Image (cartoon, rainbow, N blue to C red):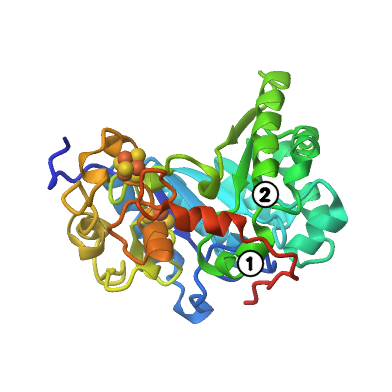
Amino acid sequence: MAAPNAVPAPLGLLAELTHRCPLGCPYCSNPLALDRRDDEIDAATWARVFREAAALGVLQVHLSGGEPAARRDLPEIVKAARDAGLYSNLITSGVGLTPQTLAALADAGLDHVQVSMQDSEQASADHIAGYEGASARKRAISGEVVRLGLPLTINLVVHRANVGRIEPMVELALSLGASRVEIAHVQYYGWAMKNRAALMPSKAQVDEAVREVEMLRARHHGRIVIDAVVPDYFARFPKPCVGGWGRRSLNVTPAGKVLPCHAAEVIPGLEFWNVREHSLGEIWRSSPAFNVFRGEAWMQEPCRSCARREQDFGGCRCQAFLIAGDARATDPVCHLSPRHALVSQLAEAREDMAYSYRTN
Ligand code: SF4
Ligand code: FES
C-alpha cells in the first residue's frame, strides 16, 4: 500500500491556454462557465509555470484549449516550453491555425501535433463541429504538419453519429500521414453532459467498434498506432483517471487555476490555488485540492479493500460526484459499485434530439 502522505513527481502538464474556440462541438468537456480572454495568464507567466513544472519532474506539456491558436503569442509559449526542456504537444482543432503560424511553431521547437477529426464524411464532420468547412481545413493543416516533418496524431472523437465509421476514419488518418490515431469515445463532463442522450451509442455499436479496432490494429500493424479504450459507461472497470489524483499530472486553466484534473471544478468545496499567487511546486505539494484524494485514506468500500485500487485508484472522482453525488464514492462505472445500476440506466438513455452546440 502506498504511503498516504508520499507526494510523487508529476510527468505531464495540461496547459489550457485559452477557452476561446471557433468550433461548437456538442461533446466539449470544458466547463459550462469559461474563462474570459481578459483573465488569461500571459506568456511570461506560462514560461515561469513551464520552468517550475520541469523542476518538479514534468516531461511533457500538452498545449490545449479551446483552440490554442486563438492566442497570438502561441509561438512565444511554445518556445518557452522548449527553453524549459519540455516535450511539447499541440492539441488543436486545426481551424484558425494557419500554415504560417504552424511553421513559426515548428521553428519555436514544437515537438508534436494532435488534430481532432469529427468524421470521415465531411458534411457530417462539419455538422458535428457546428462549423461549415471545418473538415477541409483540418485535412489541409494536417498535411502541413506532415510536410514540416512533425509527428501527427489524429484524434477521432467517437459517439453515436460516427461510431459506425471507425474504419474509414482510420483510413483517413493513414492517408493524412498520421503515425498515431486515438479513438476517443466521448467523456461526459462539462458541456457534453447537455448532449449525453444525443451522443450515447448503443451497446451493439460499442461491441462492434471494439471488434473493428482489433481488426484494424492487426491490418495496420507497423503502419500506424491505434489507441482506443472501451468507453466509460460500457466498461466493467473504471479508467485510472489522470493516472490517479495528484499522482501524475496537473492542469492549469487559462486563468491560472491549477486543477488535479480537467473537470475538478465540478466537485463542490475544493480549494484550488492559482499560479498568480503560488509556485507550481507549492501547489502540487500543498494545495488542499491536490491532497484531498491523494493516497487511499479517502476511499470507501468496495475500493478500500479491493485488489485493483492501486491500478485504477477507484476510478474518476468527478464521475463519482456527477453520477453518484459523492466524490469519495467508488466510480459508478465499476461493476462492483453499489451504484453501478445508475450507469447502466444512463447508457440506455438515448434520444434522437438536435445537438446543443457549445457557444463561446
Ligand atoms: Fe477499482 Fe474500486 Fe472498482 Fe476495485 S472497487 S475495481 S478499486 S473502482
Ligand atoms: Fe476529474 Fe476524472 S475527470 S478525476
* Residue identified by numbered label 1: 195
Q: Is 314 left, or right, of 172 in this rendering?
A: left
Q: Quick one: 326 or 265, which is closer to the camera?
A: 326
Label 1 CA crowd tier, 10 Å (few <14, some 14–19, many 20+):
many
Callout 2 secondary element: loop
Residue 124 rendering spot, x and y as whole percentages: 83, 56
For the question of whether residue 246 can be seen, the reply is yes
- Name the quadrant containing residue 73: bottom right
> Is the distance from the Cβ of mark 2 to the nearest ligand 1 atom less than 8 Å?
no
Q: Quick one: 176 or 24, which is closer to the camera?
A: 24
* Residue identified by numbered label 2: 202
Residue shown at the point (65%, 42%) measured from the top left: 206
Q: Is 138 left, or right, of 44 in this rendering?
A: right
For the question of whether residue 47 can be seen, the reply is no
Q: Which of marks 2 and 1 is nearer the N terminus?
A: 1
In the rendered view of the protein, which quadrant contains the C terminus? bottom right
Label 2 CA crowd tier, 10 Å (few <14, some 14–19, many 20+):
some
Q: Could you tell me the amino acid type at mark 1?
A: Asn
Q: Could you tell me the amino acid type at mark 2?
A: Ser
Residue 115 rendering spot, x and y as whole percentages: 66, 48
Callout 1 secondary element: helix
> Is the distance from the Cβ of mark 1 to the nearest ligand 2 atom less than 8 Å?
no
- Name the quadrant containing residue 65: bottom right
Residue shown at the point (69%, 58%) measured from the top left: 97
| Distance in Å between CA atoms under marks 2 and 1 | 15 Å
Q: Is 287 left, or right, of 116 in this rendering?
A: left
Residue shown at the point (39%, 47%) measured from the top left: 242
Find residue 178 and name its label.
none
**Ligand 1 positioned in quadrant:** top left
Say if 307 sits above or below 194 in the image.
above
